[in-house]
Amino acid sequence: MRNLLGFWIDTISWKNLKFRFLISFTWVEKMKDRIINKSAEIAVIGLGYIGLPTAIMFANAGFNVIGYEIRKEVVEKLNSGNSHIIEPEIDDLLHKAIDRGRLKATSNKDDIRGKDVYLICVQTPLRDDKTPDLTYLEEAVRTVAETMKKGSLVVIESTIPPMTTLKMGRLIEEIRGFKAGVDFYMVHAPERVMPGRIFKELVYNSRIIGGVTEESAELAEILYRSFAKGQIFRTNSTTSEMVKLMENTFRDVNIALANEFALLAHQYGVNIFEAIELANTHPRVKIHTPGIGVGGHCLPKDPYLLLSSAKEDFGLIQKAREINEDMPLFAKDLLMNALKMINIPPEEAIVVVLGLAYKGDSDDIRNSPALAFVEGIKEDVKEVRSYDPYVKGTHETLEEALKGADAAVIATDHSQFKNLDWEKIGSLMRNKILIDGRYIVKTPPKGFVFKGLGRGEY
Ligand SMILES: NC(=O)c1ccc[n+]([C@@H]2O[C@H](COP(=O)([O-])OP(=O)(O)OC[C@H]3O[C@@H](n4cnc5c(N)ncnc54)[C@H](O)[C@@H]3O)[C@@H](O)[C@H]2O)c1
């Protein structure tokens, strides 16, 4: 309320203030009632990895939810009861929401007019020059501005650079004439879930809700309470934007440190995984896990989003990104050295990349270091094949992919790769080179030229 009053004092007279306070008081109480008794209607903009599970959760909590998505094929698939993303429990939960008539998808803006709540869950990627591409977000905000009503609650769940919620509030004002915090409620409520555990984490993770006013944050908290059991912390929108970006930047920088340790370990002939395990016995040390790189929609871009609104350069975060981006090239060095060891000219080599997804047991290939690795070797070798049990367009079976190949490179820690009988599989290969970029093969298999990232030798 203090923020809201400050905002109003700048813009309106005291006489109007009293009048508007009464209106706002009535609005907020009405909206609270509508949310508490689940009669508030919700539109979710963008039905991807975050938007779809979120829409399903609100629908199964008892709200009428409509998902607005620009990809028509996704809308058709969802309305016929099929999810376009792979995630534990999603099929059952989606069917439940659709069968109860609580969830529908649409590509028609008219279907989302006059809703009480708009949740924006669109992607916020980087451009090639590593600056934020906010065009999806701006388009989604335009859609909301055109369709919302006075008194709607607008929630941005997407991860965004600091101060973007305030900018998007101003965009709505330009388009529709509604002022954020005065004519409608607005918050940034970042998502912290991890693919593979989304439905559990949506319920049990703690949440940060950053309001442009305290009332906005309060309404959003009541909304999320309909299914969330974790703690909810309220703050302002810019703090919330920064918190989300700091979390992923913290992880990215710490992985970069682990990766730098791994590179150093190669120089000293040390197995970094043993060294890290020992270092982590210190009560205040928790070193992350090194590997072939950092992928996914979030970690590789969020540090750049954090830096994007800053007025000067910040070296540590930038350097950490560069270290992580170079790890696929280090894996390439390991491969080239292994080929050299048994005198295979790279231009004659058939290389099989095992796993294209950026993380184990997922189909998500966004910013995957496996793809960067493929890109990095494809001009140097004769043929690059790939096998990923979750990713379409790769070889059907591991055996088919490895037949007649010279080298296998493990780029993703899928469970399926964890206990393979390499000595048996090796009999299918023309030459036996195994590069482990994910510390999956603990004991080098007999008869192989084996190189593990972080295992201390080139
Ligand atoms: N994926 C994750 O694990 C994760 C975790 C936490 C936060 N986030 C953040 O959440 C946001 C969404 O990520 P995601 O992984 O769900 O992205 P996504 O690409 O899977 O989904 C975004 C969806 O929005 C749709 N879309 C784009 N513009 C639209 C518009 N104008 N109107 C309607 N639909 C539109 C796209 O077609 C797509 O289906 C991002 O900001 C991301 O950083 C993602």
Image: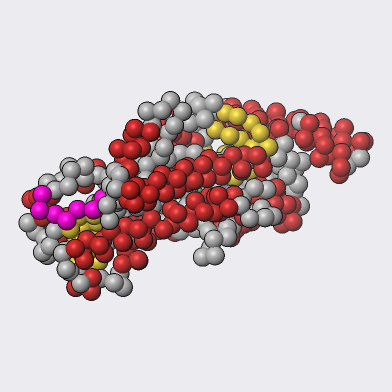
Image position of 339 with respect to 287: above or below: below
Looking at the picture, does residue 384 appear above or below residue 64? below
Q: Quadrant of the C terminus?
A: bottom left
Q: Quadrant of the N terminus?
A: top right
Kindly indicate the quadrant of the structure image that contains residue 374: bottom left
* Residue located at (30% from left, 69% from top): 378
Q: Quadrant of residue 409?
A: bottom left
Q: Position of residue 415 (x, y in %)?
A: 24, 42
Q: Nearer the viewer, residue 360 or 275?
A: 275
Q: x%, y% of residue 258?
A: 41, 44
The residue positioned 34% from the left and 32% from the top of the image is: 278
Q: Is residue 253 magenta?
A: no
- Tell me if residue 433 can be seen: yes
Q: Is residue 168 left or right of residue 337?
A: right
Eyeballing the image, is 321 above or below 349?
Answer: above
Residue 316: horizontal and vertical position, in percent? 55, 49
Indicate whether residue 449 is drawn in magenta. yes
Work out whether residue 94 or residue 163 is closer to the camera in this orientation and state it: 163
Is 431 on the left-hand or right-hand side of 300? left
Residue furthest front in the image:
268
Residue at 45% x, 45% y is 257
Say how the picture is coloured: secondary structure
Frontmost residue, 355 versus 114 = 355
Q: Is residue 56 visible?
A: no
Q: From what the image shows, is residue 73 above or below residue 280?
A: below
Residues rendered magenta in the picture: 446-452
Residue at 41% over, 58% down: 326
Q: How many marks?
A: 0
Left or right? Give the position of 129 relative to 52: right
Image location (x, y in percent) of residue 178: 75, 48
